Image (cartoon, helix red, strand yellow):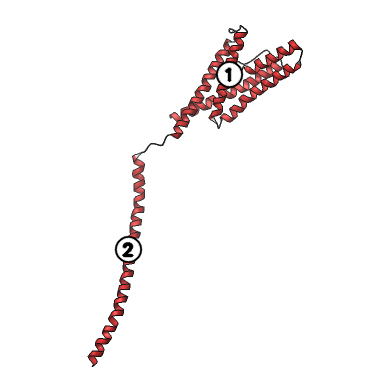
């Protein structure tokens, strides 16, 4: 496997990881809405935190608006991951944005676990976040390497130069032959003109000689 193929594979793997994060985050949101008892660690935590905060504020204040706002924000966050995944297929900068966004999600997880004094309970999520963040960072690094490879000029090889010279040699010979033919044609035309001019000059001389002879 060439270095380019290695970096392309690494970038594609990062895209697959980003899609998996977005997919499992959406599944976790659906699980919260349906009050299911399961969740996937290989996902973003910020949508669930936003929804949990909105639900808690709605219970404390009795205003359902907090719950609706938390739900909308959670869906928007998941949608943002999906949009970045779509753009990252053609724009490596989108993968960088997704990596930074997931890093912010990791910081939010650490803040929430520390505030709730539940680091041990969220340890699996923290470990998975570290793994995903590393995979995304490797994809960004691969994109940078691929871009540098694209900017570098191709190395010069001596063999193709010789082959090209061999291919161009018949063309050079043909051009030389055409030049010789053109030179011969010009020389022949010049000889004809010279002969015609000399012939016109010699004609009167013959006539004068004949007349003097007759006399």
From this view, report whether residue 71 is shown above or below residue 113.
Answer: below
From this view, report whether residue 176 is shown above or below residue 57.
Answer: below
User: Which residue is outermost to the front?
Assistant: 61
Q: Which residue is mark 2?
A: 183
Location of residue 170 in the rendering, given as x and y in whole percent from the top left corner: 35, 53
Which quarter of the figure has residue 117?
Answer: top right
Location of residue 122 in the rendering, given as x and y in whole percent from the top left corner: 59, 10
Q: Kindly state the secondary structure of the residue where label 1 is placed.
A: helix
Q: Quadrant of the N terminus?
A: top left
Q: Kindly state the secondary structure of the residue where label 2 is placed.
A: helix
What residue sits 32% from the left and 61% below the top? 180
- Would you say the residues marked 1 and 2 are in contact, meaning their CB atoms lie under 8 Å apart? no
Is 210 placed left or right of 165 in the picture? left
Q: Quadrant of the C terminus?
A: bottom left
From this view, report whether residue 188 is shown above or below residue 44.
Answer: below
Q: Which residue is mark 1?
A: 104
Judging depth in this view, the residue of 53 and 129 nearest the camera is: 53
Which mark is on residue 6? Answer: none
Q: How many marks?
A: 2
Q: CA distance from mark 1 to mark 2?
A: 80 Å
What residue sits 35% from the left and 43% below the top? 161
Which quarter of the figure has residue 39?
Answer: top right
Disc 1 versus disc 2: nearer the observer: 1
Location of residue 197 in the rendering, given as x and y in whole percent from the top left corner: 31, 76
Which quarter of the figure has residue 106?
Answer: top right
Location of residue 74 in the rendering, given as x and y in whole percent from the top left corner: 67, 20
Is 205 placed left or right of 84 in the picture? left
* Whether residue 128 can be seen here: yes
Is 63 placed left or right of 125 in the picture? right
- In primary-sequence order, the first of circles 1 and 2 is 1
């Amino acid at each position: 496997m060439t270095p380019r193929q290695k970096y392309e594979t690494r970038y594609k793997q990062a895209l697959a990881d980003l899609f998996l994060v977005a997919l499992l985050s959406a599944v976790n949101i659906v699980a919260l809405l349906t009050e299911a008892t399961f969740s996937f660690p290989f996902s973003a935590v910020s949508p669930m935190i936003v929804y949990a905060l909105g639900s808690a504020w709605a219970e404390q204040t009795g205003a359902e608006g907090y719950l609706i706002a938390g739900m909308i924000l959670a869906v928007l966050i998941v949608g943002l991951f999906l949009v970045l995944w779509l753009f990252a297929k053609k724009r490596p900068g989108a993968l960088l944005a997704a990596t930074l966004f997931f890093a912010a999600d990791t910081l939010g997880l650490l803040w929430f676990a520390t505030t709730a004094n539940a680091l041990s309970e969220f340890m699996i999520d923290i470990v998975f976040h570290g793994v995903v963040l590393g995979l995304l960072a490797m994809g960004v690094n691969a994109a940078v390497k691929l871009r540098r490879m694209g900017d570098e000029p191709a190395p010069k090889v001596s063999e193709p130069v010789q082959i090209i010279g061999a291919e161009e040699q018949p063309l050079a010979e043909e051009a030389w032959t055409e030049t010789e033919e053109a030179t011969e044609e010009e020389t022949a035309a010049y000889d004809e003109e010279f002969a015609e001019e000399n012939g016109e000059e010699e004609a009167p001389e013959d006539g004068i000689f004949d007349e003097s002879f007759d006399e």
